Amino acid sequence: MRCKLTSVAEAASLVQSGDRLAVGGSLLRRQPLALCRELVRREVRDLTLVSWASSLATDLLVGAGCVTAWEGIYVGMWWQGGAPNFRRAVETGHIDVTDYSESYLTARFRAAAMGLPFLPVRPIRGTTWTERDDIRTITDPYTGVELHTVPAATTASTILHAYAGDEFGNIVWPVHRDSDDIDLLMGAAANTLVVSVERVIPHSEVVRQPNLTYIPHTKVAAVCEAPFGAYPSSCDTVYDEDQAELAAWAQAGRADEDFAAYLERTISGPTDHAAYLDQVGRERLAALRVEATEGTR
Amino acid sequence: MTATRNELMVSAIASTLRDEELVFVGVGTSGRAFTLAVGIPLVAARLAQLAHAPALDIYWGNLLSPDLSESPTVLTQDAITRWPGAYAPADVGLKVDMLTRGEFDVSFESAAQVDRHGNLNITRIGTDALPTVRLVGTLAQPEHLAFVKRPIIVCDLSSRVFVESVDYITSFGFGDGTRTRASLGYDGGGPSLVITDHAVFDFGPEGRMRLRTLHPGVTVDDVQARMSFEPEIAEDLEQTPAPSADALRLIREQIDPSGALLRV
Protein backbone atom coordinates (compact mmCIF):
# COMPACT_ATOMS: atom_id res chain seq x y z
CA MET A 1 0.00 0.00 0.00
CA ARG A 2 1.10 3.55 -0.63
CA CYS A 3 -0.60 6.87 -0.08
CA LYS A 4 -2.87 7.78 -3.01
CA LEU A 5 -4.52 10.77 -1.40
CA THR A 6 -4.56 13.83 -3.68
CA SER A 7 -6.53 17.03 -4.14
CA VAL A 8 -9.77 16.83 -6.11
CA ALA A 9 -8.12 18.63 -9.02
CA GLU A 10 -5.11 16.28 -9.06
CA ALA A 11 -7.35 13.23 -8.93
CA ALA A 12 -9.50 14.51 -11.79
CA SER A 13 -6.39 15.22 -13.86
CA LEU A 14 -6.05 11.47 -14.44
CA VAL A 15 -9.02 11.72 -16.80
CA GLN A 16 -7.90 12.81 -20.27
CA SER A 17 -9.62 14.25 -23.30
CA GLY A 18 -10.74 11.45 -25.61
CA ASP A 19 -11.18 8.94 -22.77
CA ARG A 20 -13.95 6.40 -22.59
CA LEU A 21 -15.00 7.31 -19.05
CA ALA A 22 -17.20 5.24 -16.75
CA VAL A 23 -19.26 7.51 -14.49
CA GLY A 24 -20.63 6.06 -11.26
CA GLY A 25 -23.67 6.68 -9.10
CA SER A 26 -27.28 6.00 -9.92
CA LEU A 27 -30.22 8.33 -10.44
CA LEU A 28 -29.84 11.20 -7.95
CA ARG A 29 -27.36 9.31 -5.75
CA ARG A 30 -23.58 9.73 -5.59
CA GLN A 31 -23.10 11.54 -8.87
CA PRO A 32 -19.33 12.27 -8.90
CA LEU A 33 -19.88 15.98 -9.39
CA ALA A 34 -16.85 17.43 -7.58
CA LEU A 35 -14.68 15.43 -10.01
CA CYS A 36 -16.89 16.40 -12.98
CA ARG A 37 -16.59 20.11 -12.15
CA GLU A 38 -12.80 19.77 -12.34
CA LEU A 39 -13.13 18.16 -15.77
CA VAL A 40 -15.24 21.12 -16.85
CA ARG A 41 -12.69 23.61 -15.40
CA ARG A 42 -9.94 21.86 -17.38
CA GLU A 43 -12.06 21.89 -20.55
CA VAL A 44 -11.66 18.16 -21.12
CA ARG A 45 -13.15 17.23 -24.50
CA ASP A 46 -14.33 14.27 -26.61
CA LEU A 47 -15.29 11.97 -23.75
CA THR A 48 -17.34 8.85 -24.36
CA LEU A 49 -19.33 8.31 -21.17
CA VAL A 50 -20.48 4.90 -20.00
CA SER A 51 -23.06 4.95 -17.21
CA TRP A 52 -25.70 3.06 -15.30
CA ALA A 53 -28.73 5.29 -14.52
CA SER A 54 -27.01 8.67 -14.76
CA SER A 55 -28.38 12.11 -14.02
CA LEU A 56 -26.41 15.23 -13.13
CA ALA A 57 -22.91 13.97 -13.97
CA THR A 58 -23.82 13.16 -17.56
CA ASP A 59 -25.99 16.27 -17.91
CA LEU A 60 -23.20 18.50 -16.60
CA LEU A 61 -20.45 17.07 -18.79
CA VAL A 62 -22.70 17.16 -21.86
CA GLY A 63 -23.87 20.70 -21.06
CA ALA A 64 -20.25 21.84 -20.74
CA GLY A 65 -19.30 20.42 -24.12
CA CYS A 66 -17.01 17.66 -22.76
CA VAL A 67 -18.85 14.73 -24.36
CA THR A 68 -19.20 13.34 -27.87
CA ALA A 69 -20.89 10.01 -27.07
CA TRP A 70 -22.77 8.21 -24.31
CA GLU A 71 -23.48 4.51 -23.69
CA GLY A 72 -25.78 3.25 -20.95
CA ILE A 73 -29.21 2.41 -19.59
CA TYR A 74 -30.68 5.79 -18.62
CA VAL A 75 -30.05 9.50 -18.42
CA GLY A 76 -32.63 11.65 -16.65
CA MET A 77 -33.25 13.66 -13.52
CA TRP A 78 -35.59 11.12 -11.91
CA TRP A 79 -38.19 13.01 -9.83
CA GLN A 80 -37.25 16.16 -11.75
CA GLY A 81 -37.96 14.81 -15.26
CA GLY A 82 -35.57 14.73 -18.21
CA ALA A 83 -31.88 15.69 -18.17
CA PRO A 84 -32.17 18.97 -20.09
CA ASN A 85 -28.68 19.38 -21.58
CA PHE A 86 -28.39 15.70 -22.49
CA ARG A 87 -31.80 15.75 -24.16
CA ARG A 88 -31.04 18.82 -26.20
CA ALA A 89 -27.62 17.53 -27.28
CA VAL A 90 -29.17 14.26 -28.49
CA GLU A 91 -32.10 16.00 -30.18
CA THR A 92 -29.77 18.38 -32.06
CA GLY A 93 -27.38 15.59 -33.08
CA HIS A 94 -24.45 16.87 -31.00
CA ILE A 95 -23.77 13.57 -29.24
CA ASP A 96 -24.16 9.93 -30.21
CA VAL A 97 -26.08 7.61 -27.91
CA THR A 98 -25.86 3.83 -27.67
CA ASP A 99 -28.60 2.32 -25.53
CA TYR A 100 -28.11 -0.89 -23.57
CA SER A 101 -30.62 -2.51 -21.25
CA GLU A 102 -29.58 -3.47 -17.73
CA SER A 103 -28.56 -7.09 -18.38
CA TYR A 104 -26.56 -6.10 -21.46
CA LEU A 105 -24.72 -3.30 -19.64
CA THR A 106 -23.93 -5.38 -16.54
CA ALA A 107 -22.53 -8.05 -18.88
CA ARG A 108 -20.30 -5.42 -20.50
CA PHE A 109 -18.85 -4.42 -17.11
CA ARG A 110 -18.64 -8.03 -15.90
CA ALA A 111 -16.64 -8.91 -19.03
CA ALA A 112 -14.24 -6.05 -18.33
CA ALA A 113 -13.99 -7.08 -14.67
CA MET A 114 -13.21 -10.68 -15.69
CA GLY A 115 -10.60 -9.69 -18.24
CA LEU A 116 -12.73 -11.06 -21.07
CA PRO A 117 -13.26 -9.35 -24.44
CA PHE A 118 -17.01 -10.07 -24.45
CA LEU A 119 -19.73 -12.02 -22.70
CA PRO A 120 -22.84 -13.79 -23.94
CA VAL A 121 -26.24 -12.65 -22.69
CA ARG A 122 -29.74 -14.08 -22.87
CA PRO A 123 -30.92 -12.51 -26.13
CA ILE A 124 -33.62 -9.83 -26.13
CA ARG A 125 -34.58 -10.08 -29.78
CA GLY A 126 -36.91 -7.94 -31.83
CA THR A 127 -36.00 -4.58 -30.28
CA THR A 128 -34.53 -1.61 -32.14
CA TRP A 129 -31.47 -1.34 -29.89
CA THR A 130 -30.36 -4.96 -30.26
CA GLU A 131 -30.30 -4.64 -34.06
CA ARG A 132 -26.90 -3.03 -33.96
CA ASP A 133 -23.40 -4.03 -35.04
CA ASP A 134 -21.90 -4.19 -31.54
CA ILE A 135 -24.47 -6.78 -30.50
CA ARG A 136 -23.61 -10.07 -32.19
CA THR A 137 -24.57 -13.70 -31.89
CA ILE A 138 -22.69 -16.75 -30.69
CA THR A 139 -23.67 -20.39 -30.57
CA ASP A 140 -23.44 -22.11 -27.20
CA PRO A 141 -20.90 -24.90 -27.92
CA TYR A 142 -22.64 -27.15 -25.36
CA THR A 143 -26.27 -26.88 -26.42
CA GLY A 144 -26.25 -25.20 -29.83
CA VAL A 145 -28.48 -22.39 -28.54
CA GLU A 146 -27.86 -18.95 -30.07
CA LEU A 147 -27.05 -16.11 -27.68
CA HIS A 148 -26.23 -12.43 -28.05
CA THR A 149 -22.80 -11.09 -27.13
CA VAL A 150 -21.75 -7.67 -25.88
CA PRO A 151 -18.25 -6.19 -25.89
CA ALA A 152 -16.47 -5.57 -22.59
CA ALA A 153 -16.93 -2.04 -21.20
CA THR A 154 -13.25 -1.28 -21.55
CA THR A 155 -12.66 2.21 -20.23
CA ALA A 156 -9.61 4.46 -20.01
CA SER A 157 -10.83 5.96 -16.75
CA THR A 158 -13.57 5.62 -14.15
CA ILE A 159 -14.87 8.22 -11.67
CA LEU A 160 -16.90 7.32 -8.58
CA HIS A 161 -18.10 9.24 -5.55
CA ALA A 162 -18.12 7.21 -2.34
CA TYR A 163 -18.93 7.41 1.35
CA ALA A 164 -15.46 7.06 2.92
CA GLY A 165 -11.98 5.76 2.28
CA ASP A 166 -8.49 5.71 3.71
CA GLU A 167 -5.37 7.40 2.33
CA PHE A 168 -4.38 4.21 0.51
CA GLY A 169 -7.61 4.13 -1.47
CA ASN A 170 -9.56 1.45 0.38
CA ILE A 171 -13.13 2.56 -0.30
CA VAL A 172 -15.78 1.58 2.25
CA TRP A 173 -19.53 1.70 2.36
CA PRO A 174 -21.76 1.90 5.41
CA VAL A 175 -23.66 -1.19 6.56
CA HIS A 176 -26.94 0.46 5.63
CA ARG A 177 -27.12 2.26 2.28
CA ASP A 178 -29.00 2.45 -1.00
CA SER A 179 -27.30 -0.21 -3.10
CA ASP A 180 -29.17 0.38 -6.36
CA ASP A 181 -26.09 1.08 -8.52
CA ILE A 182 -23.14 -0.75 -10.11
CA ASP A 183 -20.24 1.19 -8.54
CA LEU A 184 -18.88 -2.08 -7.12
CA LEU A 185 -18.78 -3.60 -10.61
CA MET A 186 -17.42 -0.41 -12.22
CA GLY A 187 -14.59 -0.47 -9.66
CA ALA A 188 -13.76 -4.08 -10.48
CA ALA A 189 -13.81 -3.31 -14.22
CA ALA A 190 -11.77 -0.09 -14.00
CA ASN A 191 -8.35 0.65 -15.45
CA THR A 192 -7.56 4.14 -14.12
CA LEU A 193 -9.93 4.48 -11.15
CA VAL A 194 -10.45 7.85 -9.48
CA VAL A 195 -12.60 8.02 -6.33
CA SER A 196 -13.77 11.01 -4.34
CA VAL A 197 -15.00 10.29 -0.80
CA GLU A 198 -17.15 12.21 1.62
CA ARG A 199 -14.47 11.78 4.28
CA VAL A 200 -11.04 10.26 4.61
CA ILE A 201 -10.91 7.88 7.56
CA PRO A 202 -7.92 6.32 9.36
CA HIS A 203 -6.70 3.01 7.97
CA SER A 204 -7.19 1.60 11.49
CA GLU A 205 -10.96 2.06 11.02
CA VAL A 206 -10.91 0.20 7.72
CA VAL A 207 -9.07 -2.86 9.02
CA ARG A 208 -11.66 -3.49 11.72
CA GLN A 209 -14.34 -4.33 9.11
CA PRO A 210 -12.59 -5.26 5.85
CA ASN A 211 -15.81 -6.69 4.43
CA LEU A 212 -17.12 -3.11 4.16
CA THR A 213 -14.33 -2.28 1.71
CA TYR A 214 -16.05 -2.55 -1.66
CA ILE A 215 -13.10 -1.28 -3.68
CA PRO A 216 -9.58 -2.29 -2.57
CA HIS A 217 -6.62 0.08 -2.74
CA THR A 218 -5.00 -2.08 -5.42
CA LYS A 219 -7.66 -0.91 -7.89
CA VAL A 220 -7.47 2.79 -7.05
CA ALA A 221 -5.25 5.29 -8.88
CA ALA A 222 -6.19 8.32 -6.77
CA VAL A 223 -8.50 9.05 -3.85
CA CYS A 224 -9.52 12.55 -2.79
CA GLU A 225 -11.67 14.02 -0.05
CA ALA A 226 -14.70 15.90 -1.35
CA PRO A 227 -17.35 16.50 1.30
CA PHE A 228 -20.70 17.06 -0.45
CA GLY A 229 -18.89 15.78 -3.53
CA ALA A 230 -22.18 14.59 -5.02
CA TYR A 231 -24.04 17.87 -4.36
CA PRO A 232 -26.67 18.78 -5.54
CA SER A 233 -27.42 15.07 -5.87
CA SER A 234 -27.51 12.97 -2.69
CA CYS A 235 -25.05 10.73 -0.93
CA ASP A 236 -27.35 8.21 0.71
CA THR A 237 -27.00 8.06 4.50
CA VAL A 238 -25.02 11.35 4.46
CA TYR A 239 -27.22 14.01 2.78
CA ASP A 240 -30.29 14.28 0.58
CA GLU A 241 -30.46 15.92 -2.82
CA ASP A 242 -31.10 19.69 -2.91
CA GLN A 243 -34.54 20.01 -4.53
CA ALA A 244 -34.25 23.76 -5.07
CA GLU A 245 -30.88 23.44 -6.77
CA LEU A 246 -32.14 20.60 -8.98
CA ALA A 247 -35.02 22.83 -10.05
CA ALA A 248 -32.58 25.68 -10.78
CA TRP A 249 -30.43 23.27 -12.82
CA ALA A 250 -33.46 22.01 -14.76
CA GLN A 251 -34.48 25.60 -15.49
CA ALA A 252 -30.98 26.72 -16.56
CA GLY A 253 -30.60 23.61 -18.70
CA ARG A 254 -33.47 24.61 -20.96
CA ALA A 255 -31.23 26.84 -23.11
CA ASP A 256 -27.52 26.72 -23.99
CA GLU A 257 -26.87 30.33 -22.96
CA ASP A 258 -28.65 29.91 -19.62
CA PHE A 259 -26.66 26.79 -18.79
CA ALA A 260 -23.44 28.52 -19.86
CA ALA A 261 -24.27 31.22 -17.32
CA TYR A 262 -24.98 28.54 -14.71
CA LEU A 263 -21.57 26.97 -15.41
CA GLU A 264 -19.88 30.36 -15.28
CA ARG A 265 -21.38 31.05 -11.85
CA THR A 266 -20.94 27.60 -10.28
CA ILE A 267 -17.74 26.31 -11.90
CA SER A 268 -15.68 29.12 -13.40
CA GLY A 269 -16.38 31.41 -10.44
CA PRO A 270 -15.25 29.21 -7.54
CA THR A 271 -11.64 28.09 -8.04
CA ASP A 272 -12.02 24.70 -6.36
CA HIS A 273 -14.45 22.40 -4.57
CA ALA A 274 -14.13 24.17 -1.20
CA ALA A 275 -14.84 27.53 -2.83
CA TYR A 276 -17.87 26.02 -4.54
CA LEU A 277 -19.23 24.75 -1.22
CA ASP A 278 -18.70 28.22 0.25
CA GLN A 279 -20.66 29.68 -2.63
CA VAL A 280 -23.53 27.23 -2.09
CA GLY A 281 -23.48 28.12 1.61
CA ARG A 282 -22.45 25.92 4.52
CA GLU A 283 -25.80 26.35 6.29
CA ARG A 284 -27.71 25.32 3.21
CA LEU A 285 -25.55 22.20 2.94
CA ALA A 286 -25.88 21.37 6.62
CA ALA A 287 -29.67 21.42 6.28
CA LEU A 288 -29.44 18.55 3.77
CA ARG A 289 -27.67 16.22 6.20
CA VAL A 290 -29.54 13.09 7.23
CA GLU A 291 -29.05 11.33 10.50
CA ALA A 292 -27.09 8.12 10.11
CA THR A 293 -29.26 5.86 12.21
CA GLU A 294 -29.71 2.21 11.45
CA GLY A 295 -32.96 0.67 10.28
CA THR A 296 -35.32 3.50 11.16
CA ARG A 297 -37.76 5.33 8.98
CA MET B 1 -68.80 3.79 -1.87
CA THR B 2 -67.94 4.65 -5.47
CA ALA B 3 -64.50 3.68 -6.67
CA THR B 4 -62.26 6.31 -8.19
CA ARG B 5 -60.56 5.73 -11.53
CA ASN B 6 -57.31 4.86 -9.73
CA GLU B 7 -59.08 2.41 -7.40
CA LEU B 8 -60.65 0.66 -10.40
CA MET B 9 -57.18 0.30 -11.92
CA VAL B 10 -55.81 -1.01 -8.61
CA SER B 11 -58.59 -3.55 -8.28
CA ALA B 12 -58.25 -4.76 -11.89
CA ILE B 13 -54.57 -5.46 -11.24
CA ALA B 14 -54.92 -6.93 -7.76
CA SER B 15 -57.40 -9.55 -8.92
CA THR B 16 -54.77 -11.02 -11.28
CA LEU B 17 -52.00 -11.39 -8.65
CA ARG B 18 -51.68 -14.81 -7.03
CA ASP B 19 -50.27 -16.12 -3.79
CA GLU B 20 -46.50 -16.73 -3.70
CA GLU B 21 -45.88 -14.83 -6.92
CA LEU B 22 -43.02 -12.34 -7.24
CA VAL B 23 -43.91 -8.93 -8.67
CA PHE B 24 -41.63 -6.02 -9.59
CA VAL B 25 -42.58 -2.38 -8.91
CA GLY B 26 -40.37 0.57 -9.87
CA VAL B 27 -39.47 3.59 -7.72
CA GLY B 28 -39.30 6.66 -9.93
CA THR B 29 -40.74 9.80 -11.46
CA SER B 30 -43.34 12.20 -10.09
CA GLY B 31 -46.90 13.42 -10.51
CA ARG B 32 -49.28 11.32 -12.59
CA ALA B 33 -46.38 9.28 -13.96
CA PHE B 34 -45.55 8.29 -10.35
CA THR B 35 -49.13 7.21 -9.70
CA LEU B 36 -49.08 5.02 -12.83
CA ALA B 37 -45.60 3.53 -12.41
CA VAL B 38 -45.41 3.21 -8.62
CA GLY B 39 -48.59 4.19 -6.79
CA ILE B 40 -51.18 2.01 -8.53
CA PRO B 41 -48.93 -1.09 -8.78
CA LEU B 42 -47.80 -0.81 -5.15
CA VAL B 43 -51.34 -0.40 -3.80
CA ALA B 44 -52.54 -3.26 -6.03
CA ALA B 45 -49.82 -5.62 -4.81
CA ARG B 46 -50.48 -4.67 -1.19
CA LEU B 47 -54.23 -5.11 -1.69
CA ALA B 48 -53.63 -8.58 -3.12
CA GLN B 49 -51.47 -9.44 -0.08
CA LEU B 50 -54.15 -8.32 2.34
CA ALA B 51 -57.13 -9.72 0.43
CA HIS B 52 -56.15 -13.06 -1.09
CA ALA B 53 -52.40 -13.53 -1.64
CA PRO B 54 -50.66 -13.23 1.75
CA ALA B 55 -47.38 -14.71 0.46
CA LEU B 56 -47.20 -12.48 -2.64
CA ASP B 57 -43.68 -11.04 -2.77
CA ILE B 58 -42.96 -7.50 -3.92
CA TYR B 59 -39.59 -6.33 -5.28
CA TRP B 60 -39.71 -2.53 -5.02
CA GLY B 61 -36.81 -0.84 -6.78
CA ASN B 62 -33.87 -2.68 -5.28
CA LEU B 63 -35.71 -3.80 -2.14
CA LEU B 64 -37.32 -7.24 -1.83
CA SER B 65 -40.30 -7.59 0.51
CA PRO B 66 -40.51 -3.96 1.66
CA ASP B 67 -42.43 -3.38 4.87
CA LEU B 68 -45.65 -1.79 3.59
CA SER B 69 -47.49 -1.79 6.91
CA GLU B 70 -47.11 1.99 6.76
CA SER B 71 -47.77 3.85 3.54
CA PRO B 72 -44.94 5.94 2.09
CA THR B 73 -45.85 9.62 2.45
CA VAL B 74 -42.66 11.43 1.46
CA LEU B 75 -40.19 9.61 -0.76
CA THR B 76 -36.94 11.48 -0.31
CA GLN B 77 -33.70 9.61 -0.97
CA ASP B 78 -33.27 9.09 2.75
CA ALA B 79 -36.75 7.61 3.16
CA ILE B 80 -35.97 5.11 0.38
CA THR B 81 -32.52 4.34 1.83
CA ARG B 82 -34.01 3.48 5.20
CA TRP B 83 -37.13 1.65 4.04
CA PRO B 84 -37.23 -1.70 5.89
CA GLY B 85 -37.19 -4.82 3.75
CA ALA B 86 -35.84 -8.37 3.46
CA TYR B 87 -33.09 -7.99 0.84
CA ALA B 88 -31.23 -5.33 -1.12
CA PRO B 89 -28.31 -6.82 -3.07
CA ALA B 90 -24.95 -5.05 -2.84
CA ASP B 91 -24.65 -5.44 -6.60
CA VAL B 92 -27.87 -4.60 -8.43
CA GLY B 93 -26.68 -6.97 -11.17
CA LEU B 94 -27.98 -9.77 -8.95
CA LYS B 95 -31.51 -8.40 -9.33
CA VAL B 96 -30.97 -8.20 -13.09
CA ASP B 97 -29.95 -11.88 -12.99
CA MET B 98 -33.26 -12.72 -11.30
CA LEU B 99 -34.99 -11.03 -14.23
CA THR B 100 -33.10 -12.81 -16.99
CA ARG B 101 -33.52 -16.15 -15.21
CA GLY B 102 -37.28 -15.63 -15.40
CA GLU B 103 -37.87 -15.49 -11.64
CA PHE B 104 -40.43 -12.64 -11.79
CA ASP B 105 -44.10 -13.39 -12.42
CA VAL B 106 -45.43 -9.87 -12.91
CA SER B 107 -43.94 -6.43 -13.65
CA PHE B 108 -45.50 -3.03 -14.30
CA GLU B 109 -44.67 -0.90 -17.31
CA SER B 110 -45.21 2.70 -18.34
CA ALA B 111 -44.18 4.06 -21.72
CA ALA B 112 -44.30 7.14 -23.92
CA GLN B 113 -45.64 4.94 -26.74
CA VAL B 114 -47.51 1.62 -26.67
CA ASP B 115 -48.53 0.03 -29.94
CA ARG B 116 -51.15 -2.42 -31.18
CA HIS B 117 -48.83 -5.34 -30.52
CA GLY B 118 -47.76 -4.26 -27.05
CA ASN B 119 -44.31 -3.07 -28.07
CA LEU B 120 -43.11 -0.25 -25.79
CA ASN B 121 -40.99 2.86 -26.40
CA ILE B 122 -39.15 4.71 -23.63
CA THR B 123 -36.11 5.62 -25.75
CA ARG B 124 -36.94 8.23 -28.38
CA ILE B 125 -39.70 9.77 -30.52
CA GLY B 126 -38.74 10.39 -34.16
CA THR B 127 -35.91 8.82 -36.13
CA ASP B 128 -32.48 7.67 -35.01
CA ALA B 129 -30.86 10.27 -37.27
CA LEU B 130 -32.67 13.10 -35.53
CA PRO B 131 -34.92 12.20 -32.64
CA THR B 132 -37.53 14.86 -31.98
CA VAL B 133 -37.74 13.83 -28.34
CA ARG B 134 -35.06 11.94 -26.46
CA LEU B 135 -36.60 9.87 -23.67
CA VAL B 136 -34.91 8.15 -20.72
CA GLY B 137 -33.28 5.14 -22.43
CA THR B 138 -34.10 1.52 -21.64
CA LEU B 139 -33.59 0.64 -17.94
CA ALA B 140 -34.66 -3.01 -17.48
CA GLN B 141 -37.91 -2.70 -19.38
CA PRO B 142 -36.60 -4.83 -22.29
CA GLU B 143 -35.87 -7.62 -19.78
CA HIS B 144 -39.34 -7.28 -18.29
CA LEU B 145 -41.09 -7.83 -21.61
CA ALA B 146 -38.64 -10.56 -22.60
CA PHE B 147 -38.45 -12.64 -19.42
CA VAL B 148 -41.24 -11.75 -16.94
CA LYS B 149 -44.20 -14.10 -17.17
CA ARG B 150 -47.08 -11.56 -17.17
CA PRO B 151 -45.98 -7.92 -17.52
CA ILE B 152 -48.81 -5.42 -17.01
CA ILE B 153 -48.81 -2.10 -18.89
CA VAL B 154 -50.26 0.78 -16.83
CA CYS B 155 -50.89 3.93 -18.91
CA ASP B 156 -53.58 6.59 -19.29
CA LEU B 157 -55.43 6.22 -22.57
CA SER B 158 -54.26 8.85 -25.09
CA SER B 159 -53.90 8.84 -28.87
CA ARG B 160 -50.33 10.15 -28.48
CA VAL B 161 -49.40 7.12 -26.37
CA PHE B 162 -51.49 4.38 -28.03
CA VAL B 163 -50.05 4.41 -31.55
CA GLU B 164 -50.22 1.96 -34.47
CA SER B 165 -46.44 1.33 -34.36
CA VAL B 166 -43.94 2.66 -31.84
CA ASP B 167 -41.14 4.84 -33.29
CA TYR B 168 -38.56 2.72 -31.46
CA ILE B 169 -38.99 -0.75 -29.98
CA THR B 170 -37.33 -0.45 -26.57
CA SER B 171 -39.18 -3.52 -25.35
CA PHE B 172 -40.58 -6.24 -27.57
CA GLY B 173 -44.20 -7.22 -26.95
CA PHE B 174 -45.75 -9.24 -29.74
CA GLY B 175 -43.80 -7.75 -32.68
CA ASP B 176 -45.72 -6.81 -35.78
CA GLY B 177 -47.65 -9.98 -36.56
CA THR B 178 -44.82 -11.41 -38.70
CA ARG B 179 -42.08 -11.54 -36.08
CA THR B 180 -43.78 -13.46 -33.30
CA ARG B 181 -42.41 -14.20 -29.85
CA ALA B 182 -42.09 -17.88 -30.69
CA SER B 183 -40.18 -17.17 -33.92
CA LEU B 184 -37.69 -15.03 -31.94
CA GLY B 185 -37.14 -17.77 -29.39
CA TYR B 186 -39.09 -16.33 -26.46
CA ASP B 187 -40.56 -18.84 -24.05
CA GLY B 188 -44.01 -17.36 -23.41
CA GLY B 189 -44.23 -14.03 -21.62
CA GLY B 190 -45.11 -10.75 -23.27
CA PRO B 191 -47.55 -8.13 -21.99
CA SER B 192 -50.60 -9.70 -20.38
CA LEU B 193 -52.82 -6.70 -19.68
CA VAL B 194 -53.07 -3.00 -20.40
CA ILE B 195 -54.68 -1.16 -17.50
CA THR B 196 -55.83 2.38 -18.38
CA ASP B 197 -57.95 5.13 -16.85
CA HIS B 198 -60.82 4.25 -19.22
CA ALA B 199 -60.65 0.54 -19.93
CA VAL B 200 -58.72 -2.70 -19.59
CA PHE B 201 -57.21 -4.55 -22.57
CA ASP B 202 -55.55 -7.90 -23.05
CA PHE B 203 -53.93 -9.37 -26.17
CA GLY B 204 -55.66 -11.78 -28.57
CA PRO B 205 -54.12 -14.99 -29.90
CA GLU B 206 -52.43 -13.02 -32.72
CA GLY B 207 -50.85 -10.67 -30.19
CA ARG B 208 -53.12 -7.73 -30.98
CA MET B 209 -54.49 -5.45 -28.27
CA ARG B 210 -58.09 -6.35 -27.38
CA LEU B 211 -60.60 -4.26 -25.43
CA ARG B 212 -61.66 -6.45 -22.51
CA THR B 213 -63.61 -4.27 -20.04
CA LEU B 214 -64.87 -0.68 -19.95
CA HIS B 215 -64.77 1.36 -16.76
CA PRO B 216 -68.25 2.46 -15.56
CA GLY B 217 -69.70 5.23 -17.75
CA VAL B 218 -67.15 4.73 -20.55
CA THR B 219 -68.25 3.76 -24.10
CA VAL B 220 -66.36 2.03 -26.89
CA ASP B 221 -66.42 5.36 -28.76
CA ASP B 222 -64.80 7.11 -25.79
CA VAL B 223 -62.02 4.53 -25.86
CA GLN B 224 -61.55 4.68 -29.62
CA ALA B 225 -61.35 8.48 -29.53
CA ARG B 226 -58.31 8.14 -27.27
CA MET B 227 -56.39 5.66 -29.43
CA SER B 228 -54.55 6.01 -32.76
CA PHE B 229 -55.47 2.46 -33.80
CA GLU B 230 -58.58 0.33 -33.59
CA PRO B 231 -58.19 -2.36 -30.96
CA GLU B 232 -59.89 -5.72 -31.28
CA ILE B 233 -62.99 -5.89 -29.13
CA ALA B 234 -63.73 -8.92 -26.98
CA GLU B 235 -66.99 -10.68 -27.85
CA ASP B 236 -67.88 -10.74 -24.18
CA LEU B 237 -66.98 -7.08 -23.56
CA GLU B 238 -67.96 -6.26 -20.00
CA GLN B 239 -67.72 -3.53 -17.43
CA THR B 240 -64.58 -3.38 -15.30
CA PRO B 241 -65.61 -4.99 -11.98
CA ALA B 242 -65.97 -2.45 -9.19
CA PRO B 243 -63.79 -3.10 -6.16
CA SER B 244 -65.67 -4.52 -3.19
CA ALA B 245 -66.46 -2.35 -0.18
CA ASP B 246 -63.83 -4.34 1.74
CA ALA B 247 -61.20 -3.61 -0.92
CA LEU B 248 -62.03 0.10 -0.93
CA ARG B 249 -61.82 0.22 2.86
CA LEU B 250 -58.42 -1.50 2.77
CA ILE B 251 -57.11 0.92 0.13
CA ARG B 252 -58.39 4.07 1.86
CA GLU B 253 -57.92 3.22 5.52
CA GLN B 254 -55.02 0.80 5.64
CA ILE B 255 -52.87 0.85 2.50
CA ASP B 256 -52.81 4.50 1.44
CA PRO B 257 -54.54 6.61 4.10
CA SER B 258 -52.44 9.69 3.26
CA GLY B 259 -53.30 9.41 -0.43
CA ALA B 260 -49.62 9.73 -1.34
CA LEU B 261 -49.80 6.80 -3.76
CA LEU B 262 -53.12 7.46 -5.50
CA ARG B 263 -53.72 11.21 -5.06
CA VAL B 264 -52.89 12.33 -8.61
Image (tube, helix red, strand yellow):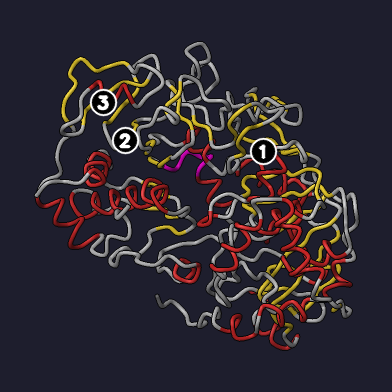
- The residue under label 1 is A99
Q: Position of residue A297 (x, y in %)?
A: 40, 75
Instruction: Judge by depth and name the residue closer to the eye, B174 or A1.
Output: B174
Q: Residue at x 20, y 55 (%)?
A: B251
Q: Nearer the viewer, mark 1 or mark 3?
A: 3
Task: Quadrant for residue B129, please give it.
Answer: top right
Q: Which mark is residue B195?
A: 2
By secondary structure, the bulk of the magenta-drawn segment is best described as loop
* Tag 3 secondary structure: helix
B180 shown above or below A70: above
Q: Position of residue B109 (x, y in %)?
A: 43, 40
Dot 1 alpha-carbon crowd within 10 angstroms: few under 14, some 14 to 19, many 20 or more: many
Gap between marks 2 and 1 measured at Cα: 28 Å
Q: Position of residue B149 (x, y in %)?
A: 40, 34
The answer to whether residue B60 is visible is yes
Identify which amino acid the numbered label 1 is placed on: Asp
Q: Which mark is residue B222?
A: 3
Dot 3 alpha-carbon crowd within 10 angstroms: few under 14, some 14 to 19, many 20 or more: some
Q: Residue at x 25, y 25 (%)?
A: B212
What chain does mark 2 sit on? Answer: B
> For the magenta stretch, what is the residue range?
B99-104
* Tag 2 secondary structure: strand
